Protein backbone atom coordinates (compact mmCIF):
# COMPACT_ATOMS: atom_id res chain seq x y z
CA UNK A 1 0.00 0.00 0.00
CA UNK A 2 2.76 2.36 1.03
CA UNK A 3 4.66 1.77 -2.19
CA UNK A 4 1.51 2.42 -4.31
CA UNK A 5 1.04 5.70 -2.47
CA UNK A 6 4.68 6.67 -3.05
CA UNK A 7 4.55 5.90 -6.74
CA UNK A 8 1.27 7.82 -7.12
CA UNK A 9 2.89 10.81 -5.46
CA UNK A 10 5.95 10.48 -7.67
CA UNK A 11 3.70 10.38 -10.75
CA UNK A 12 1.79 13.46 -9.58
CA UNK A 13 5.07 15.24 -8.97
CA UNK A 14 6.31 14.39 -12.42
CA UNK A 15 3.06 15.56 -13.99
CA UNK A 16 3.23 18.88 -12.16
CA UNK A 17 6.85 19.29 -13.18
CA UNK A 18 6.12 18.64 -16.84
CA UNK A 19 3.27 21.20 -16.74
CA UNK A 20 5.38 23.89 -15.16
CA UNK A 21 8.48 23.31 -17.36
CA UNK A 22 8.06 25.35 -20.56
CA UNK A 23 7.92 23.03 -23.61
CA UNK A 24 11.03 23.31 -25.76
CA UNK A 25 10.04 25.45 -28.72
CA UNK A 26 10.60 23.79 -32.06
CA UNK A 27 13.47 25.40 -33.98
CA UNK A 28 12.28 27.85 -36.65
CA UNK A 29 11.81 26.31 -40.03
CA UNK A 30 11.78 27.78 -43.53
CA UNK A 31 8.97 25.57 -44.77
CA UNK A 32 6.75 26.54 -41.84
CA UNK A 33 7.47 30.23 -42.19
CA UNK A 34 6.69 30.20 -45.92
CA UNK A 35 3.83 27.71 -45.80
CA UNK A 36 1.19 30.19 -46.92
CA UNK A 37 3.45 31.73 -49.54
CA UNK A 38 5.18 29.09 -51.67
CA UNK A 39 6.96 25.76 -51.42
CA UNK A 40 10.55 25.90 -50.20
CA UNK A 41 12.72 23.38 -51.95
CA UNK A 42 16.25 22.11 -52.23
CA UNK A 43 18.29 19.95 -54.59
CA UNK A 44 19.28 16.50 -53.33
CA UNK A 45 22.69 15.02 -54.10
CA UNK A 46 23.95 11.46 -53.87
CA UNK A 47 24.68 11.69 -50.12
CA UNK A 48 21.07 12.69 -49.48
CA UNK A 49 19.60 10.14 -51.86
CA UNK A 50 21.69 7.27 -50.52
CA UNK A 51 21.22 8.32 -46.89
CA UNK A 52 24.94 8.81 -46.08
CA UNK A 53 24.66 12.53 -45.29
CA UNK A 54 22.44 12.20 -42.23
CA UNK A 55 23.05 15.76 -40.99
CA UNK A 56 22.09 17.12 -44.41
CA UNK A 57 18.97 14.94 -44.39
CA UNK A 58 17.95 16.34 -40.98
CA UNK A 59 18.12 19.85 -42.42
CA UNK A 60 16.10 18.85 -45.48
CA UNK A 61 13.35 17.28 -43.37
CA UNK A 62 13.19 20.24 -41.03
CA UNK A 63 13.34 23.12 -43.49
CA UNK A 64 12.14 21.97 -46.91
CA UNK A 65 8.90 20.65 -48.39
CA UNK A 66 10.02 20.28 -52.01
CA UNK A 67 12.93 18.41 -53.56
CA UNK A 68 14.59 18.19 -56.96
CA UNK A 69 17.20 15.73 -58.18
CA UNK A 70 20.48 17.61 -58.61
CA UNK A 71 22.11 15.02 -60.85
CA UNK A 72 20.73 11.48 -60.62
CA UNK A 73 18.01 11.85 -63.25
CA UNK A 74 20.20 13.46 -65.90
CA UNK A 75 20.36 11.32 -69.02
CA UNK A 76 24.09 10.62 -68.77
CA UNK A 77 23.61 9.19 -65.27
CA UNK A 78 20.35 7.36 -65.76
CA UNK A 79 20.81 6.03 -69.31
CA UNK A 80 24.54 6.13 -70.09
CA UNK A 81 24.13 3.47 -72.77
CA UNK A 82 21.05 3.04 -74.92
CA UNK A 83 18.52 0.89 -73.09
CA UNK A 84 20.71 0.51 -69.98
CA UNK A 85 19.14 2.35 -67.08
CA UNK A 86 20.50 3.06 -63.62
CA UNK A 87 17.43 3.93 -61.60
CA UNK A 88 18.74 3.08 -58.15
CA UNK A 89 19.60 6.57 -56.91
CA UNK A 90 16.54 8.16 -58.52
CA UNK A 91 14.35 5.50 -56.87
CA UNK A 92 15.76 6.47 -53.47
CA UNK A 93 15.23 10.16 -54.24
CA UNK A 94 11.55 9.65 -55.11
CA UNK A 95 10.98 7.37 -52.12
CA UNK A 96 12.52 9.97 -49.79
CA UNK A 97 10.18 12.63 -51.14
CA UNK A 98 7.15 10.39 -50.68
CA UNK A 99 8.15 9.28 -47.19
CA UNK A 100 8.41 12.92 -46.16
CA UNK A 101 5.37 14.18 -48.02
CA UNK A 102 7.34 16.52 -50.26
CA UNK A 103 6.73 18.00 -53.68
CA UNK A 104 9.00 16.05 -56.04
CA UNK A 105 10.51 17.51 -59.22
CA UNK A 106 12.32 15.40 -61.80
CA UNK A 107 15.30 17.13 -63.41
CA UNK A 108 15.80 17.04 -66.36
CA UNK A 109 14.55 15.17 -69.43
CA UNK A 110 16.04 17.01 -72.40
CA UNK A 111 19.25 18.97 -71.82
CA UNK A 112 22.17 19.50 -74.20
CA UNK A 113 24.62 18.90 -71.33
CA UNK A 114 25.31 15.70 -69.37
CA UNK A 115 23.99 13.59 -72.21
CA UNK A 116 25.92 10.66 -73.68
CA UNK A 117 26.99 10.65 -77.31
CA UNK A 118 24.98 7.49 -78.03
CA UNK A 119 21.86 9.63 -77.95
CA UNK A 120 22.80 11.29 -81.23
CA UNK A 121 24.95 8.81 -83.12
CA UNK A 122 24.77 5.38 -84.76
CA UNK A 123 27.33 2.57 -84.41
CA UNK A 124 29.58 4.24 -86.97
CA UNK A 125 29.59 7.47 -84.99
CA UNK A 126 27.44 9.26 -87.57
CA UNK A 127 24.48 11.42 -86.59
CA UNK A 128 21.22 9.45 -86.60
CA UNK A 129 18.17 10.48 -88.63
CA UNK A 130 15.40 12.73 -87.32
CA UNK A 131 13.14 9.66 -86.96
CA UNK A 132 15.67 7.71 -84.88
CA UNK A 133 16.39 10.75 -82.73
CA UNK A 134 12.70 11.29 -82.04
CA UNK A 135 12.32 7.61 -81.14
CA UNK A 136 15.24 7.89 -78.69
CA UNK A 137 13.82 11.01 -77.09
CA UNK A 138 10.46 9.31 -76.74
CA UNK A 139 11.95 6.15 -75.22
CA UNK A 140 14.05 8.13 -72.75
CA UNK A 141 11.17 10.32 -71.64
CA UNK A 142 8.72 7.43 -71.42
CA UNK A 143 11.16 5.36 -69.39
CA UNK A 144 11.67 8.07 -66.77
CA UNK A 145 8.29 9.74 -66.60
CA UNK A 146 6.56 6.37 -66.93
CA UNK A 147 8.55 4.79 -64.09
CA UNK A 148 7.62 7.55 -61.66
CA UNK A 149 4.09 8.13 -62.98
CA UNK A 150 1.87 9.51 -60.22
CA UNK A 151 4.88 9.91 -57.91
CA UNK A 152 6.99 12.71 -59.41
CA UNK A 153 4.75 15.78 -59.38
CA UNK A 154 6.52 17.85 -62.00
CA UNK A 155 9.30 17.53 -64.58
CA UNK A 156 11.83 19.98 -65.94
CA UNK A 157 11.10 18.76 -69.45
CA UNK A 158 13.49 20.96 -71.41
CA UNK A 159 16.44 22.70 -69.82
CA UNK A 160 18.44 25.67 -71.13
CA UNK A 161 17.35 25.73 -74.78
CA UNK A 162 17.68 29.50 -75.18
CA UNK A 163 20.71 31.82 -75.12
CA UNK A 164 21.05 35.22 -73.45
CA UNK A 165 20.29 37.12 -76.64
CA UNK A 166 17.10 35.16 -77.15
CA UNK A 167 18.37 32.95 -79.95
CA UNK A 168 17.85 29.20 -79.80
CA UNK A 169 20.79 27.23 -78.51
CA UNK A 170 22.30 25.14 -81.29
CA UNK A 171 22.09 21.73 -79.66
CA UNK A 172 22.26 18.28 -81.20
CA UNK A 173 18.56 17.88 -80.44
CA UNK A 174 17.78 20.98 -82.49
CA UNK A 175 20.22 20.11 -85.25
CA UNK A 176 18.92 16.59 -85.81
CA UNK A 177 15.23 16.87 -84.92
CA UNK A 178 14.59 20.50 -85.86
CA UNK A 179 12.85 23.31 -84.00
CA UNK A 180 9.95 21.12 -82.91
CA UNK A 181 12.09 19.05 -80.54
CA UNK A 182 10.82 21.11 -77.61
CA UNK A 183 7.21 20.57 -78.51
CA UNK A 184 7.82 16.83 -78.97
CA UNK A 185 9.52 16.57 -75.58
CA UNK A 186 6.52 18.14 -73.85
CA UNK A 187 4.15 15.90 -75.81
CA UNK A 188 6.02 12.71 -74.89
CA UNK A 189 6.20 13.70 -71.22
CA UNK A 190 2.49 14.44 -71.13
CA UNK A 191 1.66 11.11 -72.76
CA UNK A 192 3.80 9.27 -70.21
CA UNK A 193 2.08 10.89 -67.22
CA UNK A 194 -0.96 13.02 -68.04
CA UNK A 195 -1.18 14.22 -64.41
CA UNK A 196 2.41 15.43 -64.04
CA UNK A 197 3.16 19.12 -64.29
CA UNK A 198 5.59 20.06 -67.05
CA UNK A 199 8.11 22.87 -66.87
CA UNK A 200 10.59 24.77 -69.02
CA UNK A 201 13.71 25.63 -66.99
CA UNK A 202 16.54 28.05 -67.78
CA UNK A 203 19.14 30.37 -66.25
CA UNK A 204 19.65 34.10 -66.86
CA UNK A 205 15.89 34.55 -67.09
CA UNK A 206 16.16 38.26 -66.33
CA UNK A 207 17.77 38.85 -69.74
CA UNK A 208 15.33 40.57 -72.02
CA UNK A 209 16.26 38.41 -75.00
CA UNK A 210 15.74 35.12 -73.21
CA UNK A 211 12.58 36.41 -71.52
CA UNK A 212 11.01 37.31 -74.88
CA UNK A 213 11.85 33.98 -76.46
CA UNK A 214 10.49 32.06 -73.47
CA UNK A 215 7.25 34.01 -73.79
CA UNK A 216 7.08 33.30 -77.52
CA UNK A 217 7.76 29.60 -76.96
CA UNK A 218 5.12 29.23 -74.24
CA UNK A 219 2.53 31.05 -76.35
CA UNK A 220 3.25 28.77 -79.29
CA UNK A 221 2.97 25.65 -77.18
CA UNK A 222 -0.27 26.90 -75.66
CA UNK A 223 -1.67 27.78 -79.10
CA UNK A 224 -0.96 24.23 -80.25
CA UNK A 225 -2.61 22.74 -77.18
CA UNK A 226 0.64 21.37 -75.76
CA UNK A 227 0.69 21.11 -71.99
CA UNK A 228 3.11 23.41 -70.18
CA UNK A 229 2.46 24.23 -66.52
CA UNK A 230 5.34 26.32 -65.37
CA UNK A 231 8.54 28.20 -65.98
CA UNK A 232 11.61 27.61 -63.84
CA UNK A 233 13.83 30.64 -63.30
CA UNK A 234 17.08 29.11 -62.11
CA UNK A 235 18.38 31.89 -59.88
CA UNK A 236 22.14 31.24 -59.92
CA UNK A 237 23.13 34.65 -58.61
CA UNK A 238 26.12 36.75 -57.64
CA UNK A 239 26.33 39.57 -55.15
CA UNK A 240 25.49 42.10 -57.86
CA UNK A 241 23.76 39.96 -60.47
CA UNK A 242 21.01 39.74 -61.69
CA UNK A 243 19.34 43.11 -61.95
CA UNK A 244 16.39 42.75 -59.60
CA UNK A 245 14.10 44.98 -61.67
CA UNK A 246 14.70 42.90 -64.78
CA UNK A 247 14.14 39.74 -62.75
CA UNK A 248 10.83 41.14 -61.55
CA UNK A 249 9.79 41.97 -65.12
CA UNK A 250 10.32 38.32 -66.03
CA UNK A 251 8.29 37.06 -63.04
CA UNK A 252 5.43 39.31 -64.10
CA UNK A 253 5.68 38.51 -67.79
CA UNK A 254 5.81 34.74 -67.21
CA UNK A 255 2.92 34.81 -64.75
CA UNK A 256 0.86 36.74 -67.31
CA UNK A 257 1.06 33.66 -69.55
CA UNK A 258 -1.09 31.82 -67.04
CA UNK A 259 1.65 29.39 -65.96
CA UNK A 260 3.31 28.85 -62.59
CA UNK A 261 6.55 30.69 -61.94
CA UNK A 262 9.20 28.87 -59.94
CA UNK A 263 12.61 29.93 -58.71
CA UNK A 264 14.30 26.61 -59.29
CA UNK A 265 18.04 26.69 -58.61
CA UNK A 266 18.86 29.48 -56.22
CA UNK A 267 22.35 30.11 -54.90
CA UNK A 268 24.51 33.21 -54.53
CA UNK A 269 28.23 32.95 -55.18
CA UNK A 270 30.44 35.34 -53.22
CA UNK A 271 33.56 34.59 -55.27
CA UNK A 272 35.14 36.65 -58.04
CA UNK A 273 33.79 35.71 -61.41
CA UNK A 274 35.86 35.36 -64.58
CA UNK A 275 33.10 36.22 -67.10
CA UNK A 276 29.59 37.57 -67.47
CA UNK A 277 27.92 34.19 -67.95
CA UNK A 278 25.65 33.09 -65.11
CA UNK A 279 25.36 29.31 -65.34
CA UNK A 280 26.81 28.11 -68.62
CA UNK A 281 28.11 24.72 -67.47
CA UNK A 282 30.67 24.40 -70.25
CA UNK A 283 32.55 27.44 -68.93
CA UNK A 284 35.89 26.77 -67.20
CA UNK A 285 38.79 28.91 -66.04
CA UNK A 286 42.24 28.23 -64.58
CA UNK A 287 42.67 28.13 -60.80
CA UNK A 288 44.51 31.12 -59.33
CA UNK A 289 44.82 31.88 -55.61
CA UNK A 290 43.54 35.40 -56.11
CA UNK A 291 40.29 33.89 -57.40
CA UNK A 292 39.82 31.93 -54.15
CA UNK A 293 40.03 34.63 -51.47
CA UNK A 294 37.91 33.26 -48.59
CA UNK A 295 39.44 29.92 -47.68
CA UNK A 296 39.77 31.01 -44.03
CA UNK A 297 36.25 32.39 -43.71
CA UNK A 298 34.00 35.10 -45.05
CA UNK A 299 34.77 38.76 -44.20
CA UNK A 300 31.89 40.58 -42.50
CA UNK A 301 31.28 43.00 -45.37
CA UNK A 302 30.98 40.15 -47.87
CA UNK A 303 28.61 38.29 -45.55
CA UNK A 304 26.49 41.44 -45.27
CA UNK A 305 26.30 41.74 -49.04
CA UNK A 306 25.41 38.03 -49.28
CA UNK A 307 22.60 38.42 -46.70
CA UNK A 308 21.31 41.51 -48.44
CA UNK A 309 21.10 39.75 -51.80
CA UNK A 310 19.11 36.83 -50.30
CA UNK A 311 16.84 39.23 -48.42
CA UNK A 312 16.24 41.47 -51.43
CA UNK A 313 15.31 38.55 -53.65
CA UNK A 314 13.17 36.78 -51.06
CA UNK A 315 11.37 40.09 -50.48
CA UNK A 316 10.67 40.18 -54.20
CA UNK A 317 9.43 36.58 -54.14
CA UNK A 318 7.13 37.41 -51.23
CA UNK A 319 5.81 40.44 -53.09
CA UNK A 320 4.88 38.08 -55.93
CA UNK A 321 3.89 35.07 -53.87
CA UNK A 322 0.57 34.99 -55.73
CA UNK A 323 2.54 34.14 -58.87
CA UNK A 324 5.38 32.04 -57.46
CA UNK A 325 4.63 28.44 -56.52
CA UNK A 326 8.07 27.32 -55.34
CA UNK A 327 11.50 28.65 -54.43
CA UNK A 328 14.20 25.96 -54.54
CA UNK A 329 17.78 26.29 -53.32
CA UNK A 330 20.44 24.50 -55.36
CA UNK A 331 21.77 22.40 -52.51
CA UNK A 332 21.77 22.35 -48.71
CA UNK A 333 25.18 23.30 -47.26
CA UNK A 334 28.23 25.09 -48.60
CA UNK A 335 30.01 21.75 -48.78
CA UNK A 336 27.55 20.67 -51.47
CA UNK A 337 27.46 23.72 -53.68
CA UNK A 338 28.48 23.18 -57.33
CA UNK A 339 29.92 26.69 -57.05
CA UNK A 340 33.00 25.28 -55.29
CA UNK A 341 33.99 23.75 -58.64
CA UNK A 342 32.53 26.03 -61.26
CA UNK A 343 33.71 27.80 -63.26
CA UNK A 344 37.02 27.25 -61.42
CA UNK A 345 37.71 23.95 -59.68
CA UNK A 346 38.62 23.63 -56.01
CA UNK A 347 37.43 26.95 -54.55
CA UNK A 348 35.70 27.68 -51.24
CA UNK A 349 32.32 29.26 -51.88
CA UNK A 350 29.52 30.17 -49.47
CA UNK A 351 26.50 30.24 -51.75
CA UNK A 352 23.83 28.41 -49.71
CA UNK A 353 21.81 28.88 -46.52
CA UNK A 354 23.62 26.33 -44.32
CA UNK A 355 27.33 26.40 -43.53
CA UNK A 356 30.02 23.73 -43.67
CA UNK A 357 29.14 22.66 -40.10
CA UNK A 358 25.50 22.09 -41.03
CA UNK A 359 24.46 25.19 -39.12
CA UNK A 360 21.80 27.58 -40.39
CA UNK A 361 23.44 30.88 -41.35
CA UNK A 362 22.04 34.04 -39.70
CA UNK A 363 20.28 34.86 -42.98
CA UNK A 364 17.91 31.91 -42.46
CA UNK A 365 16.30 33.63 -39.48
CA UNK A 366 16.27 36.90 -41.40
CA UNK A 367 14.36 35.24 -44.25
CA UNK A 368 11.93 33.71 -41.76
CA UNK A 369 11.41 37.16 -40.22
CA UNK A 370 10.46 38.57 -43.63
CA UNK A 371 7.31 36.44 -43.59
CA UNK A 372 6.17 38.11 -40.36
CA UNK A 373 6.19 41.61 -41.83
O1 LIG B 1 24.83 21.15 -59.62
C1 LIG B 1 25.05 20.33 -60.73
C2 LIG B 1 26.48 19.81 -60.73
O2 LIG B 1 26.69 18.96 -59.61
C3 LIG B 1 26.76 19.06 -62.02
O3 LIG B 1 28.12 18.68 -62.07
C4 LIG B 1 26.41 19.93 -63.21
C5 LIG B 1 26.54 19.16 -64.51
O4 LIG B 1 25.61 18.13 -64.56
O5 LIG B 1 25.07 20.36 -63.12
C6 LIG B 1 24.80 21.13 -62.00
O6 LIG B 1 23.44 21.53 -62.02
C7 LIG B 1 23.05 22.34 -63.12
C8 LIG B 1 21.60 22.05 -63.39
O7 LIG B 1 21.41 20.68 -63.63
C9 LIG B 1 21.08 22.86 -64.56
N1 LIG B 1 21.31 24.27 -64.36
C10 LIG B 1 22.67 24.65 -64.01
C11 LIG B 1 23.13 23.85 -62.80
C12 LIG B 1 24.53 24.27 -62.39
O8 LIG B 1 25.42 23.95 -63.41
Image (cartoon, rainbow, N blue to C red):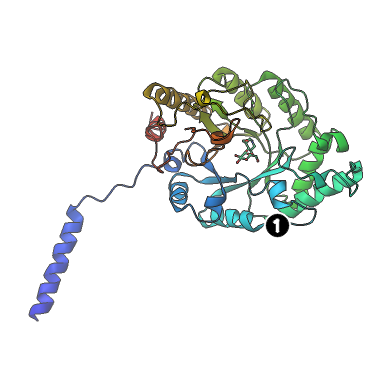
Query: Which residue is the site of mark 1?
Result: 147
| Extreme-bottom residue of the structure | 1
Return the residue nearer the eye: 210 or 46: 46
Quadrant including the C terminus: top left
Q: Left or right: where does residue 373 sit relative to residue 42?
A: left
* Local SS, label 1: helix
Residue 214: give x, y in percent of width and height.
Answer: 72, 27
Q: Left or right: where does residue 16 sit relative to residue 292?
A: left
Looking at the image, is 109 positioned above or below residue 10?
above
Return the residue nearer the eye: 135 or 10: 135
Residue at 78% from the left image edge and 42% from the top image edge:
185
Residue 268: give x, y in percent of width and height.
Answer: 51, 29
Residue 130: give x, y in percent of width and height.
Answer: 90, 41
Return the residue nearer the eye: 112 or 2: 112
Looking at the image, is 77 positioned above or below residue 251?
below
Residue 200 placement: quadrant: top right
Residue at 44% from the left image edge and 47% from the top image edge:
59
Residue at 60% from the left image edge and 54% from the top image edge:
94
Residue 126: give x, y in percent of width and height.
Answer: 90, 42
- Label 1 CA crowd tier, 10 Å (few <14, some 14–19, many 20+): some
Q: Left or right: where does residue 350 sit relative to residue 236?
A: left
Looking at the image, is 219 positioned above or below residue 185?
above
- Which quarter of the frame holds ligand 1? top right
Return the residue nearer the eye: 157 or 198: 157
Whether residue 325 is visible? no
Q: Left or right: where does residue 23 sit relative to residue 180?
A: left
Report how many numbered discs are placed on residues in the image.
Answer: 1
Amino acid sequence: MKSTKTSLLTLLGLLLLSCSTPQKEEAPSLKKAFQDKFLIGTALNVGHNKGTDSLGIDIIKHHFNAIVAENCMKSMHIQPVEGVFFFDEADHFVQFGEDNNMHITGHTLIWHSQVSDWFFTDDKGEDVSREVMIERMKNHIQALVGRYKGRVHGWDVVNEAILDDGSWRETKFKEIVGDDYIKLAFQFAHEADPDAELYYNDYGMSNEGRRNTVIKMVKELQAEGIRIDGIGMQGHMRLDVPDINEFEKSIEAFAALGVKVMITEMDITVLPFPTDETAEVSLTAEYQEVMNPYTAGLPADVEDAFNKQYIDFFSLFLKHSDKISRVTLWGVTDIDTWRNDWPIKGRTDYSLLFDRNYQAKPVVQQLIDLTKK
